[in-house]
């Protein structure tokens, strides 16, 4: 799919809560079709401008905010498929649009003198035009790489319901070539897991009960902001302390 519209609930949970929730969900959920038993690695190149506009829009929870990223899965090489994605949030509804193209073509678009957009061959031309407009308007440049190991599920009765667990969350800004692999400094404690419940309408009662039973606390967990805070340190005014970053606050 190239266009997604859904609501997302985020939680920061302990490893034990993650393991117990997977067991409780088993009668209702199936492994995601990607990866081995729903497990795969996500590596994303995020974009920002000199004034850190994307960061502040996200951190201040503007009613409308958006991000741009270039994403690959598992061990994708320079000739493999990458995805340019625009992720927008408005009134708690997440809209994501993405287009696929070879990673080397994505790099050509980013780092070489700009050819006409018609010279590229994305899977969706209109989304590529939107990405180019967003990148140009905000003057976005590659900023950092964020990667994590994902364990993903979808509901048996409602395919629009997805539950993902992100582990071993890392970031770096020293090497922005995403094909070199998912490595970097952990920006959330290794014993913590980012849980996301993604649904078109409402969360089913059985899942709500499981989350309550395990004392899963709904909590904002912006990978983009927390990574940037760790990498930028005191450069960001009002930055939270490093020890708080490592436990995932923010």
Image (cartoon, rainbow, N blue to C red):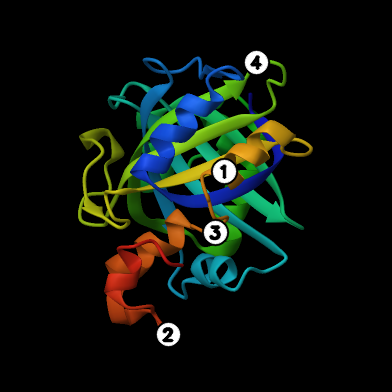
Report which residue position mark 4 lands on. 156
Tell me the number on the disc at residue 213: 1
Residue 224, quarter of picture:
bottom left
CA neighbours of label 4 inside 10 A, class few (<14), some (14 to 19), many (20+): some
Report which residue position mark 3 lands on. 219
CA distance separating discs 1 and 4:
22 Å
Determine whether, in the image, residue 51 is placed left or right of residue 92. Answer: left
Contact check, label 3 and label 1, Cβ < 8 Å: no
CA neighbours of label 2 inside 10 A, class few (<14), some (14 to 19), many (20+): few
Q: Nearer the viewer, residue 37 or 239?
A: 37
Contact check, label 4 and label 3, Cβ < 8 Å: no
Q: Secondary structure at mark 3?
A: loop
CA neighbours of label 1 inside 10 A, class few (<14), some (14 to 19), many (20+): few
Q: Nearer the viewer, residue 245 or 101?
A: 245
Report which residue position mark 2 lands on. 238
Determine the residue located farthest toward the bottom in the rendered image.
237
Mark nearer the N terminus (3 vs 2): 3
Determine whether, in the image, residue 245 is placed left or right of residue 47. Answer: left
Contact check, label 1 and label 4, Cβ < 8 Å: no
Mark nearer the N terminus (3 vs 1): 1
CA distance separating discs 3 and 2:
20 Å
Residue 213, quarter of picture:
top right
CA distance separating discs 1 and 2:
36 Å
Q: Residue at x 32, y 21 (%)?
A: 79
Mark nearer the N terminus (4 vs 3): 4
Residue 185, quarter of picture:
bottom left
CA distance separating discs 2 and 4:
44 Å
Judge whether residue 204 can be spotted in this image.
Answer: no
Q: Secondary structure at mark 4?
A: loop
């Amino acid at each position: 799919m190239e266009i997604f519209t859904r609501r997302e609930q985020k939680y920061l949970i302990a490893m034990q809560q993650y393991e117990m929730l997977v067991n409780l969900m088993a009668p209702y959920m199936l492994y995601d079709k990607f990866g081995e038993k729903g497990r795969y690695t996500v590596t994303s190149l995020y974009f920002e401008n000199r004034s850190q506009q994307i960061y502040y829009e996200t951190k201040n929870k503007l009613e409308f905010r958006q991000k741009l990223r270039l994403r690959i899965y598992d061990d994708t090489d320079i000739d493999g498929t990458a995805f340019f994605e625009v992720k927008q949030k408005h009134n708690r509804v997440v809209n994501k649009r993405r287009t696929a193209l070879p990673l080397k073509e994505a790099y050509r678009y980013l780092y070489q003198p700009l050819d006409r957009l018609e010279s590229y061959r994305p899977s969706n031309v209109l989304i590529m035009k939107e990405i180019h407009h967003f990148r140009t308007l905000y003057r976005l440049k590659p900023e950092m790489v964020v990667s994590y190991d994902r364990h993903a599920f979808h509901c048996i009765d409602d395919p629009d319901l997805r539950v993902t667990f992100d582990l071993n969350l890392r970031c770096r800004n020293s090497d922005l070539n995403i094909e070199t692999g998912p490595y970097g400094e952990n920006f959330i404690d290794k014993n913590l897991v980012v849980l996301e419940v993604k649904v078109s309408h409402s969360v089913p009662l059985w899942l709500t009960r499981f989350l309550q039973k395990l004392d899963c606390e709904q909590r904002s967990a912006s990978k983009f902001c927390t990574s940037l805070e760790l990498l930028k340190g005191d450069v960001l005014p009002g930055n939270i302390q490093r020890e708080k970053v490592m436990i995932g606050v923010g």
